[in-house]
Amino acid sequence: MGTPLGDFVRAKRDSIQPQSLGLPDRGRRRSPGLRRLDLAARAGISVEYLTRIEQGRDRRPSVAVIHALADALSLDLSEREHLRYLAKITGGECPTHTRPAPPRRDVRPAVLETLRLLEPGIAMVTNRLGDVLAHTGAYESVTSAAGLLDIDPPNLTHYVFTDARARTFFADWDDIADEQAFDLWLGPSAENSAWLTAQLTVLAGPDFTRRRNRHVVPRRGILRLNHPSGHELRLRRETLELSSDAQQLVVFLPDDDKTAQAVEQLRQRPHGRLRAIS
């Protein structure tokens, strides 16, 4: 049985063309990417040890080995952080048979006050599971018509993978789906992430499972929305990590004048005020 760490190393190895690392092209192979022999040599470990890591038979490689693999795979900063995180949860993971206690859903008063100060801007408080915990009225104006807030409590990950409207609302649905699937690895707890993952595996099918297991670190570019009103919105996302709460405050900023004007029109429509979901 594989592990998240082994799956990531194997996926990255398969995605690398030997020529990009200055290695010779050894002709056609049964599987794509870098050979285990070449990766092991670059990392300074044996092929047998690399095989054990990829197959999940070694769950506790040393910090030095993790750094060596990161260098050998030429990982960028975000990918290195993800590799270290997977090494941590792989070494300490245990099976989950029952639903754990739900993640923290309350938002601290100081965070809610910050959200109020951001009105009439578009902002929300969320966590890595995709729970929308609080939001401004402008966020509701932009998202409610597309059904994102229909479920109580709303969950962005669930919406992206199970609501057909999401594929139209998000102009770059594939990228957003990759983001939400990846973020489950960083959920409030491994147990809660596993529980939600089990739900989505049944509801969303192999497309969700494939995205989660690819371990592609998302780039999180401009968010493009096809609003049901006919407006095309382009929003930049600024995220403030609330580490002690395992939550994020996300602010959405218009990327162009056309979007700013459209958002202003949407704001003028009747909508709710600041809402905290508990």
Image (cartoon, helix red, strand yellow):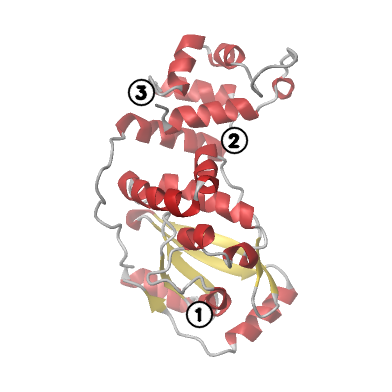
Label 1 or label 3, whichever lies nearer to me, is 3
Q: Is residue 228 above or below residue 207?
A: below
- Counting from the top left corner in percent of width and height, residue 172 is at 66, 58
Neighbour tally class for label 1: few under 14, some 14-19, many 20 plus, Cα within 10 Å: some
Q: Earlier in the sequence, mark 2 or mark 3?
A: 3
Q: Hey, which quadrant is residue 113 in on the image?
A: bottom left
Which residue is tagged 1?
119
What residue is shown at x 33% (from left), y 50% (from top)?
192
What residue is shown at x 64% (from left), y 30% (from top)?
15
Label 2 or label 3, whichever lies nearer to me, is 3
Residue type of the residue flagged with mark 2:
Asp
- Counting from the top left corner in percent of width and height, residue 73 is at 59, 25
Calculate the distance from the C-alpha at mark 1 to the C-alpha at mark 3. Answer: 47 Å
Which residue is tagged 3?
60
Could you tell me which secondary element the residue under label 2 belongs to?
loop
Calculate the distance from the C-alpha at mark 2 to the C-alpha at mark 1. Answer: 36 Å
Residue type of the residue flagged with mark 3:
Arg
Residue 235 visible in this rendered orientation of the protein:
no
